[in-house]
Image: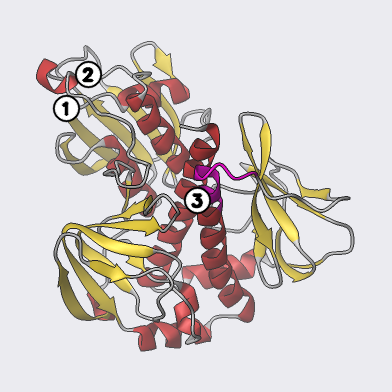
Amino acid sequence: MNGRAVLEGSLSFINLAELFQILGSNNSTGTLRVISQYAPNPGVIYFVKGNPVNGTNGSLRGLEAVYSLFGWIDGKFEFAQENVQVDRVIKNSRMEIVLDALRMLDDAAIKKLGPASLEAMPQGKRGLAPGKKSNLPVIKGSMVDYLYIVQEEEYNDGRVVVKEASHGKWIWVILEGTATVTRETPQGPLTVARLGEGSYIGAFSSLLFQDIARSATVTAEGDARLGLLDTQRLAGEFRTLSNDFRNALVSLDRRLRMVTDRAVEWFLKKPPMALPKGCEVLIPAGSSSAGAYAMEEGEAYVIGQSENTALPLVVLKKDDIFGNIPLIDMGHEPRNAMIVAPKGIKANKLDPREFEKTYNQLSGTFKSMIYCICTSIALTTRLAYLFRKGK
């Protein structure tokens, strides 16, 4: 590697799933090199703007090579920041790869490489059912700006930070430790996400200072230290944004809430929601020329794809955004989902240059909040697909 090594360490301390999130949260471009004494040659993964685009592991190439490296449970890694001159052969998003790889590890579809004692340890299922400890990947954000923190709070194992259906506008950032996000079901609490350092507990909707009910319960998993954010300062920055951009942020909240609803419904074996008759495709899945839009009138639908089955994920209503939105990757449209709607809806086209300009002027805290909620949407969508498959 000719680039400058900016991150290195041991896989026993930071695993590959966590590395993917660190590199993703920083939009890193460069080469990740993984070395193990149990493998004759290093494994290599190439990243562009935080997403893997190619990889090698012995004779394996592309996505197959990347999946295989999740089985390396002992070794060292080094990430060099540099221009990447390889073909982009991997189309899956970062969080799709992480969740699929963890499932494949559970199903013994990926061979583990490491000491025999560790390799023989049973991993069990991913702990998705209520009442079981979850092994979902931990969502982590970037470095925390302490200028936005007004108070630090300690939470011991099992202490509730926020309760589902309660009301409150506070937003926290996790400084140390992990928190579990659960939804109540007739079968007990269902784990839908795990949040780690740099992740946020709260919603952009809180900055509207409206009476909004919490959509999930968040509980400390082990001892955790949280930073309470200055919502007045965040609200001041929020008010300086354009109306379209503010609506976009609140739309992310609604989308996460809805895909979490789908995950719970499909865990409970409920059928997918029905679409109205006469829907037509506004944006096909895989489109590279789709624009960005905000709903004005009527309803549109985000349709995901799992095992060749179309699955309605989200209902888009007034002010919700959709399409190819700069710097926002939710793992949905246009790459991994399509947008359909009945005739007669109205949507306003957004200016991607203005959207990107506004994004670039945001504070690091706002950017990190956007990254965390987009990652949560992508991961929860994949979780919903797994429930739909009965995994």
User: Which circle's residue, 3 or 2, is located before the other in the chain?
Assistant: 2
User: Which circle's residue, 2 or 1, is located before the other in the chain?
Assistant: 1
Whether residue 342 is situated above or below residue 345 in the rendered picture? above
Residue range highlighted in magenta? 262-271
What amino acid is at disc 3?
A: Val
Q: Quadrant of residue 19?
A: top left
Residue 268 within the segment the image draws in magenta: yes
User: Which circle's residue, 1 or 3, is located before the other in the chain?
Assistant: 1
Residue 29 locus on image (x, y percent) = 39, 44
The residue depicted at 74 percent of the width and 49 percent of the height is 274
Asked if labels 2 and 3 touch by Cβ distance under 8 angstroms, the answer is no
In this picture, residue 303 sits left or right of residue 168: right
Provide the residue designation for mark 3: 264
The residue depicted at 22 percent of the width and 44 percent of the height is 7
Whether residue 27 is situated above or below residue 77 in the rendered picture? below
What amino acid is at disc 1?
A: Gly
Of tags 3 and 2, the one toward the viewer is 3
In this picture, residue 174 sits left or right of residue 372: left
> Distance of mark 3 from mark 2, alpha carbons?
35 Å
Provide the residue designation for mark 2: 113
Tell me, for residue 75, which label it has, or none: 1
In this view, the residue in front, 162 or 143, is 162
Whether residue 56 is situated above or below residue 95 in the rendered picture? above
Q: Mark yes or no: residue 274 visible.
A: yes
The residue depicted at 14 percent of the width and 18 percent of the height is 37
- The crowding category of the residue bearing disc 3, from other C-alpha atoms within 10 Å (few below 14, some 14 to 19, many at least 20), is many
Label 1 SS: loop
